[in-house]
Amino acid sequence: MIQGVRHFRDQYWERGTPGRSTPAQLTKRLYQLWLVGLTLKLLGSSWDVSWHFKWLRDDLAPPHLLNTVGTVIVVGLTIFHTFTGYGADKLTLRLMQIGCGIFLIALPIDVINHRVNGLDITSWSGSHALLYLGTAVMLAGAIRGWMKFFPQGNARTLGLVALWFFFLENVWFPNQHQEYGVRALQAYDSGKPEAEPILLQFAADQMGVPVGREAVVHFALPIADWVYPVWGLVAAAIVLVIARRTINRPWAATAVAGGYVAYRCLVWPLLAGIDFPKSAVPLFLVFVGLAIDAAHVIKMPTPAAAVLGSATVTTVGYVGIWFQQEYLWGPPISFSSAAVTAVLLAVLWTVGDMVIHRPEVQLLASRLKLG
């Protein structure tokens, strides 16, 4: 292995400008490593959410260490792209650099935030938002680089689906607080709390109340009920619309959404098997993906397509959440927020279409495909 690393260094570690000609084999290797690094970050973050509903926070907890390994790989790849110029043009490289920079700046801020505020809110906080933003920007760079440089073929399409899966997971991540929170409260009410006594005591001490349901509710479900559907459906739908158009394959949005739901269904028993808290899996996202793909099959003018697509996404999303509340597990939501969700999504969808149809944007897109 060491010999292979030395050979790779001697062959490719040389100063170059972004966008330089890159051997196809090197391009594949670099972007496959991106998938490896992002997968480790994904596994670490998934375990981390569950960990926070069982134990007090620990900077060196195993989920953090696993996530750190993935981050090191991603940052190392960004350094390689920067120094050698291989596998990335200027815009791709800037996105990777800015994303990694935001993420690395957010890490110490998050540590300080937890030192000051204790547990904080597991997913919804300013420091965590910076982590999501950094990940989103670096993923945008990886997606653009994959589209521009990865060789044509089935592997290119599958890799692009995987990258949009990572993007969807990052956008949806904060909603997991409510998905774990509703199960945590149910477990406590049934007399079998999944959180350790030290965590229950800490949550109660933060509120200045005895250990009990009040403290559990404050820790498990502190977010307003409108946040879960409005953020989740609008953000997820926009991501899936863009994924559908960049992948440019029938039912691509369904593949991305279905991949995310399948991943959550697989990781659920794994975490439960090692005695970590379980979550409510957003099964309804599959139908959101189907609705977006269907909206792209039916040819309509931009405003009509956006309005119909938004109405369909909102309907299947809220009905899906209601169904899970009634028959499986689902976070509490404000159903009156459906109008806000539909209007906001329709506006963003329409504005996005108007921007995309501008001549200069279409020219840039055509160049990207040709590249």
Image (cartoon, helix red, strand yellow):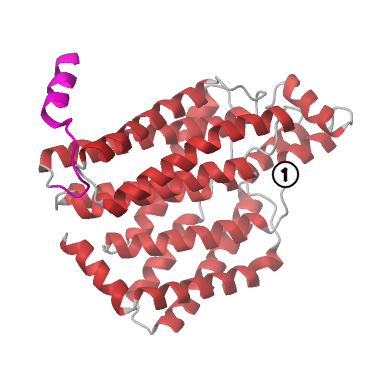
How many numbered markers are drawn?
Answer: 1
Residue 59 picture location, percent across and down: 58, 22
Q: Please, what secondary structure does the residue beneath circle 1 have?
A: loop
Looking at the picture, tell me which residue is in the foreground, 265 or 83.
Answer: 83
| Corner quadrant of residue 119 | top right
Looking at the picture, tell me which residue is in the foreground, 84 or 118.
Answer: 84
Residue 322 picture location, percent across and down: 63, 58
Q: Is residue 107 left or right of residue 192?
A: left
The answer to whether residue 269 is seen in the rendering is yes
In the picture of the structure, the residue carrying the numbered disc 1 is 221
Is residue 18 found inside the magenta-colored segment of the image? Answer: yes
| Corner quadrant of residue 194 | top right
Q: Is residue 248 left or right of residue 314?
A: left
Q: Residue at x 14, y 15 (%)?
A: 3
Q: Residue at x 53, y 45 (%)?
A: 173
Residue 318 vs 356, above or below: the answer is: above
Is residue 189 found inside the magenta-colored segment of the image? Answer: no
Magenta segment boundaries in residue numbering: 1-20
